[in-house]
Image: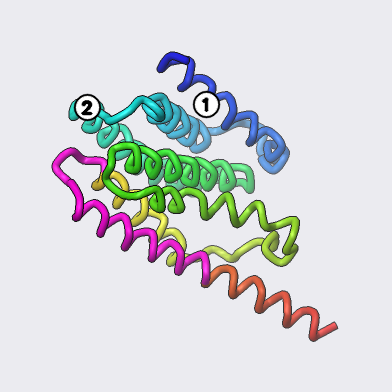
Amino acid sequence: MGYIGQCLLALIGLLLALLPFLPQHLPLERFGAANAVTLVRAGITALMVGWLGRGTLSTEVSWLIVVLATLAVLLDGVDGWLARRYGLASAFGARFDMEIDAFSILVMAALVYQSDKAGAWVILSGALRYGFVALGPIFPCLRRPLPPNKRRQTICVIQIIALIICLAPLVAPPWSVVLAGLALSLLSMSFAVDVAWLVGHSSVEKNGQ
């Protein structure tokens, strides 16, 4: 499959996966500027998907990916600001934003591995979120909504920035390995804290019944 076809397939698949959550946009009737910005971020991520599985990245392509990923990070702040500023916040918008973050981390982690900047373990950076979701049907307590948390948001941004730095041609092993490892450790700790909170609150509710 060619580069463009791979990008389009990724974008279409991502949007189709989000369709079941569209009713959560109600009672808002317009898609809104905030979601439009998030859609642009989805498109940027799809452009990065196009380079997956194509061998070692050239210096030019690596810098282009760094620029695209940096633009996506900047837009991540814009969509949230627009949602708050114009009253466009919705459960769908929050889900849309979160899933684009998760998918972009997975794609960038795979590109870091493809570039020989870190071992296959770096893909765990993106796989943790999907593993967490997959365990939901087995452990119902994991499906409970988590309260908003600055720690979670901050570590997510740190993870994304760390992967962008690792993808820069100027950063090579062992520095890229150390950076990716530290970022993954922080992300794993964040997931562990959330899981502990969910399990703990589930136990409290059961004991209170």
Image location (x, y in percent) of residue 204: 73, 82
Q: Residue drawn 58% across and 49% down? A: 130
Q: Amino acid at mark 1?
A: Leu
Q: Is residue 115 left or right of residue 175?
A: right
Q: Amino acid at mark 2?
A: Ser
Q: CA distance from mark 2 to mark 1?
A: 24 Å
Q: Residue drawn 19% across and 54% down? A: 174
Residue 160, labelled with which disc?
A: none
Q: Quadrant of residue 60?
A: top left
Question: Element type at marker 2?
Answer: loop
In what quadrant of the picture does the C terminus appear?
Answer: bottom right
Which color mode does the image show? rainbow
Name of the residue lying farthest toward the right:
209
Q: Nearer the viewer, residue 170 or 31?
A: 170
Image location (x, y in percent) of residue 206: 80, 80
Which stretch is magenta?
Answer: 167-192
Residue 58, labelled with which disc?
A: 2
**Please, is residue 7 above or below residue 136 in the view?**
above
Q: Earlier in the sequence, mark 2 or mark 1?
A: 1
Residue 74: in sight, yes or no? Answer: no
Q: Residue drawn 18% across and 38% down? A: 169
Does residue 188 show up magenta in the picture?
yes
Q: Quadrant of residue 88?
A: top right
Q: Is residue 141 left or right of residue 123?
A: right
Image location (x, y in percent) of residue 141: 71, 67
Residue 117: in sight, yes or no? Answer: yes
Q: Residue drawn 26% across and 36% down? A: 66
Q: Nearer the viewer, residue 111 or 26?
A: 111
Q: Nearer the viewer, residue 178 or 84?
A: 178
Question: Element type at marker 1?
Answer: helix
Residue 11, labelled with which disc?
A: 1
